Image (spheres, helix red, strand yellow):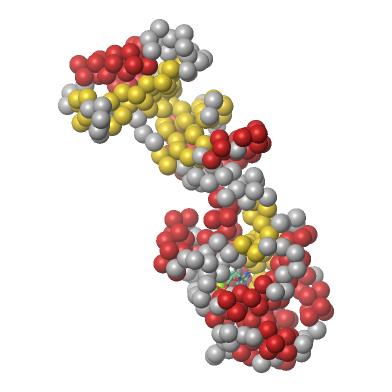
Amino acid sequence: MEKVIIIRYSEIHLKGKNRGYFERIFALNIEKSLKGFKHETHRLSGRYLVEGFDESETDSLLERLKRVFGIHSMSVALKVNSDMDAIFTAAKDVCSANGTFKVVSHRADKTFPLNSMQISAEIGGRLISSVKNISVDVHNPQFTINIDVRENGKTLVFNEFFNGAGGMPVGTSGKGLLLISGGIDSPVAGHMIAKRGMNIDCIHFHSYPYTNMQAKDKVIELVKVLSKYTCGTRLHIFSVTHIQEEIHKKCNGEYMVTLLRRFMMRIAEKCAQKCCAQCLITGESLGQVASQTVEGITSSNSVIEKLPVLRPLCGFDKDEIIERSRDIGAYEISIQPYEDCCTVFLPKHPVIKPTMANILQEEAKLDVEALLNEAMATLEIINL
Ligand code: ATP
Ligand code: MG
């Protein structure tokens, strides 16, 4: 009797002719997530089977697999030879609970001498006579024993389903560039888009020496969290120190964040084109802060020339974002109190509803092209 993990897909089976492509990427992502563990993965129809692992590592494998997008559900099963005595022994093993139960059988191997109804009836009957305190309830059972007779002379027996992460395999929806700040919102935004199958590269802006090295380390830690879901991520880091100094020196202080955001978006778009990302992703949520009013978003969006900007959190409340941040394991890192460049030279009263005319008037005081070129040259890349 061997312990195995059954992996079921979510939306992949809907993808018609592209199915092979989705399955290949999905299988690759499973392998990447289990890197370092002894195991083998085999494809069955509509599912994968992970086997040959060290049983003491079952929970660690499940932990990794829970972060793989595209997995609908998983079960830890016992794999036995397809004969009724072996199947019964396994069924007894997974039937540790007291209470009402039913047996559900599935027979992929049509040469197996009993049909699925007969398998369920016989195993159910044998269980009742050998396990104490259980009884059959086919309509509303407290637990279900599943028996799956496969074509290869092997049968899988299991009683539990764990939810997978859902979504689509990362890599099947192209690549996006996430503007990641070190706050709570942007990692959640990246996670949501990765869940829809998008590969994520990250871009971060710092204002060293006004922001410190711990602020950068914090962002690296956040990108590491994200990369557990994306099977690896590249972080692009740019300095906006001189841009901020110039805005501070030459422009109305109320426009610091508005103008800085426009520079960030311009740099991000250039960076995205260099790393072949097809869109930008931000953690903006409508109305959350002064720079995220529709006027603020209009201002930062209007410097983007070609790429779409995805803002998956636009309709979310902060509470909902925090809950997701906790779920993905980013929250404790995000709340560490290091300064972000947006808080450097922060005006007492940032402009809340900037008009384009005023923004352009302030921006005209700067040599935008020169500042952009200078910032582009500060690029540092970290693979995580
Ligand atoms: P977050 O929690 O993601 O920091 P926030 O609520 O603090 O978001 P803002 O500071 O207004 O909101 O930032 C809005 C979005 O702009 C962020 O979600 C992020 O996508 C981007 N952004 C802000 N600061 C930076 C930065 N230093 N580097 C990269 N992106 C940034
Ligand atoms: Mg922020």
The answer to whether residue 342 is visible is no
Q: Give the residue at x 76% y 74%.
A: 375
Q: Nearer the viewer, residue 68 or 60?
A: 68
- Residues 86 and 282: in front is 282
Residue 258 position in % (x across, y down): 64, 81
Mark count: 0
Residue 100 occupies which quadrant of the picture? top left
Residue 158 visible to an observer of this rendering: yes
Indicate the position of residue 291 as horizontal and vertical percent values: 58, 79
Image point 55% across, 90% down: which residue? 349
Residue appearing at x 72%, y 70% in the figure = 304
Question: In front: 195, or 342?
Answer: 195
Note whether 72 is above or below 127 in the view shown: below
Q: Quadrant of the C terminus?
A: bottom right
Can you say whether 189 is above or below 95 in the image? below
Q: Position of residue 119 (x, y in %)?
A: 34, 15
Q: Residue furthest left?
A: 133
Seen in the picture, residue 114 relative to 270 is either above or below; the reply is above
In the figure, is residue 210 to the left or right of 60?
right
Give percent across and percent down for residue 157.
39, 23
Left or right side of 130 for 270: right
User: Could you tell whether 379 is left or right of 105 in the image?
Assistant: right
Tell me which residue sits at (29%, 13%) in the image. 122
